[in-house]
Image (cartoon, rainbow, N blue to C red):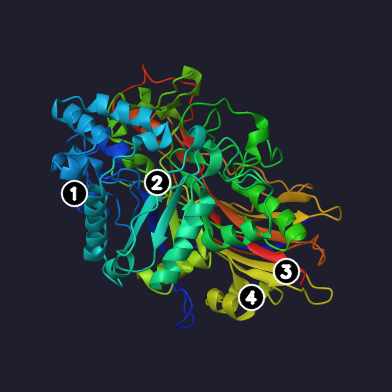
Amino acid sequence: MNKLIFAGLCCLPLSLAVADDQPTRAYFGDTHLHTSFSPDAGMAGTKVGPNDAYRFVLGETVTSSTGQEATISRPLDFVVIADHAENLGLEDAIANSDPGLLSDPLGKELYDLVKAGKGVDAFNLLVQKMAKGTEAKIKSESMLRNAWTKIMELADQYNNPGEFTAFIGYEWTSQPGGNNLHRVVVFRGDKASVEPVLPFSLFDSENAEDLWDYMAAYEKNTGGQVLAIPHNGNLSSGMMFAPKYQTDGKPIDKDYAEMRSRWEPIVEVTQSKGTGEAHPFLSPDDEFADFEIVDTTNLGGTAQRTTDMIQYEYARPALKMGLEFEQSLGANPFKFGMVGSTDSHAGLPATREDNWWGKAPFLEPSPNRWKDVLIRSSLDPALDLTALQLAASGLAGVWATDNTREAIWDAMARKEVFGTTGTRLQIRVFGGYGFGSDDLSQTDLATKGYASGVPMGSDLTDAPEGASPGFLVEAMRDPLGANLDRIQIVKGWLDENGAAQEEVHNVVWSNADVRALDAQGNLASVGSTVNEMEATYSNSIGADAHRGFWQDPDFDPAQKAFYYARVMEIPTPRWLAYDRKNYDLYDEMPEDVRYSSQERAYSSPIWYSPR
């Protein structure tokens, strides 16, 4: 039986009194937002540019690409406008008849198509060229430099230290064979520190190792700082967390492991194109592993998914594999924290199920968007990525000392972050050897956590004789959202044979007067108040907040391990239920899709290693 103490708390604020150099609150943002400056978005009809995207994020009403008035439910605390580096600013260059664009044959062809009202043809031509790599490159430094300058200037213009953070960033869009290896590159500094470089793109190299070299050179030559955030790996055909070099297919060695861990401290674990925490095929004992799974093909719709790929696409198996690499190499390539973000290509990063502005302009609210296809396979319609597979996800949560570029970037670098599937629930985790159930009565749990342990994203070493690590966890629901069901601790470890194992432990849950763990540690469902036909639910079940203490009952001080928390909300309607209700589509929309789900949050892990 798991050793645990739990308590349900009403409206407990997680912003507590801690030391000046310790995080005081959680900030919510999007590290993965596209605007019309991304060539795929711009050619597909996105009219929201970076300026209007910032206005939307800050709570202003803007005109969407389909002419609707769009407003986010609550402003975000920070954002990374991460437009694709490849042909960055193409739509803007066409609108302004950029001379460099017009001097390039492909650029001129795209320009002529758009000006003739054939934007769809221009988009399809660009997609065909992108599939062939450098054939899609428009050789115009003026187009790239002009767009990059505008992006940097707008980020500096909207950045408001203490109130709102606008990061300078972009997306590196490596997609060999249609397999998603994209990374968002995030700079810590302002325009003056970033403008010595242009974005590194697929046209420079499709190999992540070369991207890391670019980042290292930037830091060496400018004194600035930069990190990269890999996308969720579920559309990578087993390449995102593959145990080999991308350049030559050789097995990962210590140099690779150290480079990847250095430059990619966090991973996007959930977004609109699926959630990449766990997969039911790999975690059959995890009742919540089957959540927003998109696994039939890759990003290009060019390959049929096979089960042997899945183990290299999801975060939990990657974390487990990282322990194995650390055991054999002395370095862990997959020692990452976890965030969520939108990957919106509409410039409108809204994540509430009842206010989702879609993945792309043609997926903005309408009676027909549920019928649309986001990515159409050239091989087989069964490989299409359809609107019905998409989710209104996600958000990055960051525990930082202040709402500034420096504080939020530093929190990402040290992995004191969490990801949600779009809700603004908060989660905090501390691990250490000096915690106990008595700590749950303190109002300053964070002060205790920092003083006697380490926060998520950190390391524990060398347990005292006879001790096992204990974890203080607390979560608070989204003030405008659903109550909480439970907090779980996911443990991964290396057994006596060096093989990676996993187990999910229920730590604290709501309605504890009628729900108890069975002999196997399982917990009955919280139930559901959702009326899917009316797209409603009630907070008559669940809890406002949870706080708990859990101590590993099976701890072996000789075995490497990691621990992260997963917080579950009570069931709520999905965006499909709201669309069906709002547009009276009861006779049209299919019955065999999910109209409700349990939204959730994932903390970054805490790792244990024998010294």
Q: Dot 3 lies on which element?
A: loop
| Residue that mark 3 sits on | 469
Give residue 61's mark: 1
Work out how far the residue at label 4 is from the one at label 2, CA to CA, in angstroms.
32 Å
Question: Where is residue 484 drawn, in percent x and y?
Answer: 52, 52
The alpha-carbon separation of the residues under discs 1 and 2 comes to 19 Å
Q: Work out whether residue 12 can be spotted.
A: no
N-terminal-most mark, 2 or 3: 2
Could you say where residue 490 lies in the image, as x and y percent from the top left? 66, 53
Label number found at residue 342: 2
Q: Is residue 547 left or right of residue 351?
A: right
Q: Does residue 374 appear to the left or right of 4 in the view shown?
A: left
Q: State the CA–CA distance, disc 1 to disc 4.
A: 44 Å
Depth order, front residue of 376/364: 376
Label 4 close to label 2 by CB (< 8 Å): no
Determine the CA span between mark 2 and mark 3. Answer: 34 Å
Upstream in the sequence, badge 4 or badge 3? 4
- Residue at the spot 26% in from the left edge and 28% down from the top edge: 122
Q: CA distance from mark 1 to mark 3?
A: 48 Å
Relative to 33, is 255 on the left or the right?
right
Say which quadrant the N terminus sits in: bottom right
Q: State the image coordinates of residue 585 (x, y, percent, origin top left).
A: 33, 22
What residue is drawn where x is 70% and y is 77%? 434
Q: Is residue 209 visible?
A: yes
Q: Amino acid at mark 1?
A: Thr
The residue under label 2 is which amino acid type?
Thr
Q: Could you classify mark 1 by the number of other residues whose Cα lies within 10 Å: few (under 14), some (14-19), or many (20 or more)?
A: some
